[in-house]
Image (cartoon, rainbow, N blue to C red):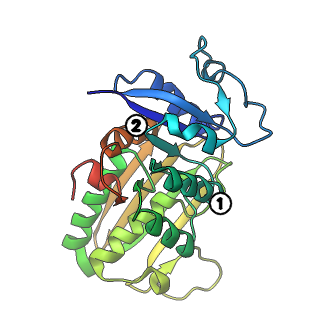
Amino acid sequence: MSSTRIAIAGCNGRMGRALLLAGAHHEGISIEVALARPGCEAVGLDIGTLMGAPPQGVRVADNLPGVIAGADVLIDFTRPGISLEYLDICRAQGRAVVLGTTGFSPVQKAQIAEMAKEIPIVFAANFSVGVNLSFRLLEIASRVLGEDADVEIIEAHHRHKVDAPSGTALAMAEVIARTLDRDLATDAVYGREGHTGARKRQTIGFATVRGGDIVGDHTVLYACEGERLEITHKASSRECFARGALRAAIWLKDKPAGLYDMQDVLGLK
């Protein structure tokens, strides 16, 4: 089987560098394109410089339309506005996309779904295999505990993260809400202060921590009378996200147009 040729957006960022390092050591991957925004100091550099490694023969570009033809799949963990621009370019040139950007609005998510009618897209809030396994565990726990538990989601990330709650926390809440037939639009509580009154059973609560260099911690607490269950995932480095994204890219390469997620990639559906 030939290697999957990938393009990495935001290659100079924290996740972009993790993807470069993981991709450089993955037998099924060939890094053909690395992309940064125009004006970025990384433009023109060999990706080996970003990796702290010898030259790799690929220089950082700032013009996706001019270079995307050299890749089968774009992997993008940037910002919503930038990602939509890149998705439109990939749609026009028939390239697949692994999309790990978070913080999209409902309207933007609808745009992604529309573009997926023309190209294959894996869109996930989290590409860690462990996190995606936890989604299945949350479905089971929610179904078994039902209305006997108060559900709270606690998440922690580094000080640079710009959206809250995290996309992963929201994805966990969506699994729980779907299983318990609840509506996040009315049942989610994103913070508490002052005299809040007694907790309502249907509430799904969120607590957000931002600080230091925390890669990503998520805990779902099911608090029952006399006992509690906690389902926790902690990421110690971005390597787990990078490996999952590369796995998704290989899986996606020859797939038909459609909107997929990591549950599809891992065969958990």
Q: Residue at x 54, y 42 (%)?
A: 215
Q: Residue at x 52, y 55 (%)?
A: 92
Q: Nearer the viewer, residue 80 or 210?
A: 80
Q: Which label sits on residue 81?
A: 1
Structural crowding at the residue carrying mark 1, measured as other residues with C-alpha within 10 Å and reported as few (<14), some (14–19) or many (≥20): few
Task: Please state, as top left, top right, bottom left or bottom right, where the C terminus lies in the image.
Answer: bottom left
Residue underneath mark 2: 246
Q: Is residue 78 above or below residue 57?
A: below
Residue 260, quarter of the rendered image: bottom left
Q: Nearer the viewer, residue 242 or 160?
A: 242
Q: Earlier in the sequence, mark 1 or mark 2?
A: 1
Q: Residue at x 63, y 40 (%)?
A: 66
Picture coordinates of residue 157 (x, y %)?
A: 58, 50
Q: Is residue 265 visible?
A: yes
Q: Secondary structure at mark 2?
A: helix
Which amino acid type corresponds to the residue marked 2 in the rendered image? Leu
- Give the left or right position of residue 129, taking residue 193 as reference: left
Q: Nearer the viewer, residue 67 or 34?
A: 67
Picture coordinates of residue 79 (x, y %)?
A: 63, 54
Picture coordinates of residue 211 (x, y %)?
A: 65, 48
